[in-house]
Image (spheres, rainbow, N blue to C red):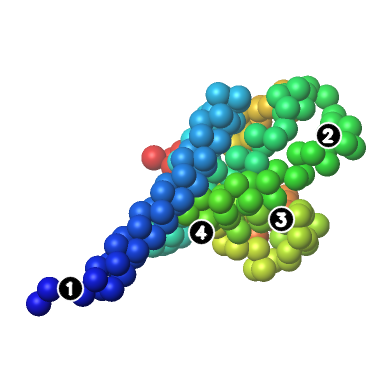
Amino acid sequence: MNQSLEETFKVADNSMYRNKLRYKLGAKNDIFAALQKAMQEKDHLATEHSERVNTIAVEFGKTLGLSSDVLRDLSALAQAHDLGLIGVSNEVLHKPGPLTTDEWSMVRQHPERGYRIAQSSTEYAGIADYILHHHERWDGTGYPLKLIGEQIPLLSRIIALADAFDVMTTGRPYRQKDSQEEALAELRRCAGSQFDPHLVEHFCSMILSSRAQ
């Protein structure tokens, strides 16, 4: 049966709407990809850090028995957790001495900035909350929302551990490189205050097990 003129217009209108929606979603993802590329060009050390955090976090996620879907989110989070630092100058990021109050305030804004960037992308919107909370602390003294304990999303707690371990074992302009033994001792010292104590136990076991192989 031939379509009526009204039905034809309706089909055409729906098609135009879907095309517009696909264009908008594609444009959002293009913007996110452009920001990721800009961050890579701005700070290659941050890119290398994210790659190492990705390797550590995903391996840890596997030992915890996380599903493949959750591991994909964890990998995306590892690669995008510091994207909000794109708004911080390299002079501040690589400053060898202590940060001023204003500089520290600028750095502390990066989880919220990263959250907003991720929300603008259909591909990364699902991990926006994890980005927002990856600097929360188990005892509630973190930022930006001072969440306590298991209020902090699991993936954010995992990234916090992988992030800290990599920073300690690779060094930064403002701190010397630690050995793995020193880094694990620091994680244990901060279990229950900065980090989830249950995760610290499993994380340290994973690192020690991998060294023994």
Whether residue 66 is visible: yes
Q: Could you tell whether 20 is left or right of 169 in the image? A: left
Q: Quadrant of the C terminus?
A: top left
Give the mark nearest the N terminus, 3 or 1: 1
Q: Residue furthest bottom?
A: 1
N-terminal label among 2 and 3: 2
Pinpoint residue 140: horizontal percent, then vertical percent.
Answer: 78, 62
Rendered residue at 47%/54% (across/down): 122
Mark 3 and mark 4: Cα distance apart in space: 18 Å
Nearer mark to the viewer, of 4 and 1: 1
**Residue at 17% over, 73% down:** 3
- Mark 1 or mark 2: name the one nearer the start of the chain: 1
The reply, left or right, for residue 82 in relation to residue 8 is right
**Residue picked out by circle 4:** 126
Observer-nearest of 77 and 9: 9
Q: Which residue is mark 3?
A: 136
C-alpha distance separating marks 4 and 1: 40 Å
Gap between marks 1 and 2, in whole Å?
A: 65 Å
